[in-house]
Each structure stands twice: as structure tokens, then as C-alpha cells.
Image: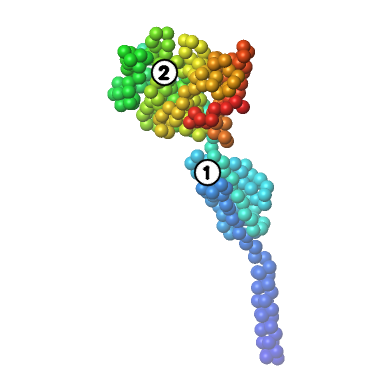
Amino acid sequence: MFTLRTDLLTASAVTAVMLGALMFCGCAPAEYQINTQVEPEGSGETAGSGVYRQGEEVILEARPAEGFTFKAWKADGETVSGEKKHAFTAERDKTLTALFEEKAPEELSLTYEADRELEGEIITVVSEEGEVVFEYSFDQFKSWADKNWEDAFEEIPAFVEEKPVYPEDLRPAFDQTAALAPDNDRLAFSVHSYFAATFMSFVGVVDLETGAAELVDTGNRGGVEALIWSPGGTYLAYTLNTAEGKGFFLSNDNTVGMVEEFTLSGEDLAEAVEGEGSGRAFPNFRHVGWEEEKKRLHFVADIDGNDTMETLDWSIKPDGTDLRIE
């Protein structure tokens, strides 16, 4: 009897242990792998990936790199969240992609104002929130010009041989044609002097971070009407008015090499119209703009052909070659 009871107790204990093991294995939650990736590469990073038990809350966070902004979380080809922090319950292995995109430059605006203490116009760069980002006064430019004028030119610009132009000859204010580069890192401006019913204009660029200024070219005949940056910020095109006619010239400068690429006149347009032009052109350059894909400067200008004024669409390469009628 004793032996039988011992065997029965032993069998019961083994059964209890086995049942407990089965119950334990059956109740343990599954574990899932949660992975993350970033598109495009280098645009940001993520936090929160790893192994999670079934039913556990997963919290992922997307962190954009400098110059990028978060767009969305995607999984299995579908957008699952537009928030940087994305929470969900772990139910299976899963891979999520954090999508980022390049941050658009902040919309900045320019204002002009006069200040008696500075004795001239001030160009002010203002943020969307109305905060002053940068100020540049004519006195700052003139101080630079006084020190660097002779070094800025191979030969001092002049209206005529007897009339060279120096900083003190400049009209003590900026022309109201300033324009910010596409990346908001540089400010283009123009100043001019006046002599014998005409203008000589100078175009400059100032770095918004350092305040360093530099003149682009040696001087243009005419007053600058508009400054138009190319999409990449390499080139700066502008129209020039003269006493003879509005928009009589179109000029383009390279702001990387700080050199003048070309200045286009009405005569150049007349020569481009083979056998049609009378040798006279009234270009009034207008609708000037850049075509980024083909890297060409487009504009509208008029040509006098056989006693009729014809309005034509033109384009030209940034270096001044391949002038064509579109």
C-alpha cells in the first residue's frame, strides 16, 4: 500500500508539473520585430524600433535632419500617420518608413527705409513673423566701396574718359530692386550714378551671414529695373533703363565667379532676326525668367520688321550664347 501511494503521488506531481508547463507556454505573449527606415537617405533618423511583446504599445519618433522636414510614416505602401510621433499596438512583425522632404526656404520680405543717422536707405530683411533678419545700410556699402573700389575693377569705370566714377559719385541710396537669393543666404542690390542724362549702375551681392559685400561687374549703362536670380542662385539677370528708352538692355552676371556674362541690346536682337529686321529694335525687355530644366533665360522683346512692330519670345544661355526666337 505504501509503495502504491508513493507511485500515485509521484505520478500526480509529474502530471501537475507538465500541466503547469503547458499552461505557462500557452499563455506567454508572442514577440514581434518592429523596424524603421528613412527616405531619402540622410534626411533624418528614427527612434523606437526593436522587439515588442504582443499587445505592447509601440511609440516611434521621426527626427528630421537640418534642412529637412518630416512628411509621413508609411507601412506596406500606405501612409499610416502624418505625425512625427506614431503610436500603435504590436500585433506582427512590421517595417515602417519615415519620409522626409527638403525644407522650403522661409518666405522673407524686403523693406526700404531712410534713417537720418545713417544718411541713406536701409534694406531690411524681414521674416514671416515680422522679425528683422538682416539690415544693410548704404553707409555700410559705401564704407566697403571706399576701401575696395580700386581693387574691385581692372579699370575704374567711366561715363567718358574724363569722367571716372568713384563711391562719392554714387546716388546715396539703394535702387529699390533688391532681391534675395533662392536659399535666402545672399542679397542682391544695385546703386547708380548719374551723368549727362544717363545712368551707370553697379550690382552687388552681400552675404547675410557675414555681411561681406562684393560688386558683380564693372558698371552698366542704364538704371537697374529688376533683379532676377536663377533657381540655383548662380546667375543674376536684370533689365536696364536708359534715357533713350525703357528696358533698353538685358544683362546677366555670374554670382559665383562674380563676373558679367553678357549685356544684350536692341541691336543684338535686330541682328538675330536674319533678313527681317530693319536694324532697329525697341526691346523693352519684359517677362524675364529662368527655365531651370534647360538652364536658359527667357524674355519677351519687340523687333521692328518691315514697318511693323512684332512681339517675340526669346531665350538665351546664361553665358550669352545661342540667342534664339522661340
* Residue that label 1 marks: 64
10 Å neighbourhood of mark 1: few (<14), some, or many (≥20)?
many
Whether 279 is drawn above or below 314: the answer is above
User: In the figure, residue 8 lies in which quadrant?
Assistant: bottom right
Residue 13 appearing in the image: yes
Which residue is rendered at x = 41% and y = 33% of the image? 257
Image location (x, y in percent) of residue 195: 38, 10
Amino acid bearing label 2:
Ser
Q: Residue at x 57, y 31 (%)?
A: 291
Judging depth in this view, the residue of 44 and 295 nearest the camera is 295
State the image quarter where residue 211 is shown. top left
Figure disc tally: 2
Q: How far apart are the two marked residues, 1 and 2, measured between alpha carbons?
A: 44 Å
For label 2, the crowd category at 10 Å Cα-Cα, with few meaning under 14, some 14 to 19 and many 20 or more, is many
Q: Is residue 143 visible?
A: no
Give the labeled residue for mark 2.
Answer: 201
What residue is shown at x 40% (from left), y 30% (from top)?
258
Q: Left or right? Give the position of 235 relative to 80.
A: left
Residue 256: horizontal and vertical position, in percent? 42, 33
Residue closer to the observer: 11 or 203: 203
Disc ID at residue 240: none
